Image (tube, grey):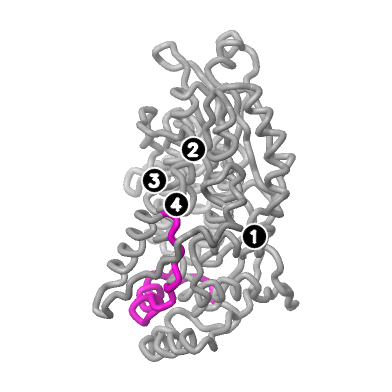
Amino acid sequence: MSGNSEGGKGLTNRCLVEEKQLPNTESGNKLSTKLKRLAEIARQEPTTKFTSLAHLLDEECLKESYRELNRDAAIGIDHISYEEYGVDLTANISGLVKRLKNKSYKAIDIRRVLIPKPEGGERALGILVLEDKIVQKAVAKILNAIYEQDFLEVSYGFRLNKNCHDALKALELAVIKGGINYILDIDIRGYFDNMNHKWLMRMLRERIVDQTVLRLIGKWLRVGIVAEGKRIRNKLGVPQGGTISPILSNIYLHYVVDLWIKKSVAQAISGRIYLIRYCDDFVIGCTGKQTAEDIWDKLPCRLIKFGLELSKEKCRLIEFGRRAYYQSKGGKKKLNTFDFLGFTHYMARSRRGGVKLSRKTIGRRMRKTLIVMNNKLREKRNLLPFRKLHTYLCRILNGYYNYYGFAGNLATLRRFEYAIRRMWYKWLNRRSHRKSFNWDQYIELLNRYPLPQPKILKGYNWIYSTNL
């Protein structure tokens, strides 16, 4: 798909691409050394296809993958826990490697559970058995080593040394320094559930022709799903919760969106275009109206070609940026806003009299978080002693403030902190049938056991480039 204006024709030109076998490495070398060598080859030879990767799935690799898994994660349908598997880890891993080599390894059905979304509704989460997690983790490392060399800078989700904050910084720079006048706020409907398996395998073959690795991925894509006692065969999508799902989702949109924007769209316009993507949630900024409208018209067809569609109720083309702010007579008229990565973004006047991109926590998301926190404190108020309960609450608040502590969001964080303080007071007073203390006594308690205070950890000045 790479290297052509349509972002798709390259799949049929495999005979023009040199095949490359990763040189065998000595067994004494550490896994990190092997992966670095793999990444080096992928970076130096961007058209190389890898014919020999399965030998990397040795005992050392799988043991390391096991140790990196979350030991407290939910168990799969085989009911084998992290601790149980680790009792005889060497023998278990040895048997797993043997099954991989003689091709008797089988993917086990996935248990599906529904979890609530922050904005409402439910998300289907797939829970794998431990051995599938181990092998998927190992294969994901191999894929990451290769595709990190191919991915564009506009992609921020599930990548090494990139995160949501980097995407938000890039968006800010594109709006303030890049002269964006129009924003396409994009959301793909049921992305993980609708990825086309045939297209995905064709994309993988652009870089990988090792049949053992491709066969493993094919097994995980077609594995059965158990929900409410019924088993169904998975014909579309990848399960959210699968260890390998993040890298597969990035590979898919790398070809479907990123390269299409870079190779086809950006080359055909006179203005500037900016893409900031975090997995399936992305925004496209344009300096010209005609460019924005052309992408708005073409993007649905591009996605449909690969089995995807836009979530029409969540997608919008809006006028946004400095010019829109000044045309609204300095923000006196109602301005467009959009939501991205947990924040509502809007234009506002800076302290120096200029214009800045400001952001605040999405209102419905903050309300949902408060509801979840209220339920958690109610459940745990008598299960944990006070000091452990206090530590638990502080840990959650620190994580919340670390994410939402962006410049311009302090007022919203303070409202959140005020609601938490009152909630904490309510549930501490309900740890027994008798009221524990009044508000003055509660303030004294907070002086001895303070809650974290909201603070701004990220500012406005960034040095990033997202121009395609």
Residue 463 appears in which quarter of the rendering?
Answer: top left
Q: Residue 199, which numbered label?
A: 1
**Earlier residue among tags 3 and 1:** 1
Q: Residue at x 59, y 47 (%)?
A: 7
Q: Are marks 1 and 4 in contact (CB under 8 Å)?
A: no
Q: Amino acid at mark 2?
A: Tyr
Crowding at dot 3, Cα within 10 Å, few <14 / some 14-19 / many 20+, comes out as: some
Above or below, 94 relative to 174: below
Pointer 3: what residue?
451
Instruction: Mark 2: give few (<14), some (14-19) or many (20+) Cα within 10 Å.
Output: few
Give the residue pinned by disc 2. 418
Left or right, residue 69 beside residue 260: left
Q: Secondary structure at mark 2?
A: helix
Q: Which sits earlier in the primary sequence, circle 4 or circle 3? A: 4
Q: Amino acid at mark 3?
A: Leu
Q: Nearer the viewer, residue 400 or 343?
A: 343
Name the residue nearer the viewer: 138 or 458: 138
Please state which of residues 381 and 56 is positioned toward the viewer in this rendering. Answer: 56
Residue 87 in view, yes or no: no
Magenta span covers which residues?
Answer: 46-75
Look at mark 4 in the image and give the residue it sits on. 150
Residue extending farthest to the left is 28
Q: CA distance from mark 2 to mark 3?
A: 11 Å
Which element type, helix, strand or loop, lies under badge 1?
helix
For residue 435, which numbered disc appears in the image? none
> Mark 1 Cα within 10 Å, few/some/many (few <14, many 20+)?
some
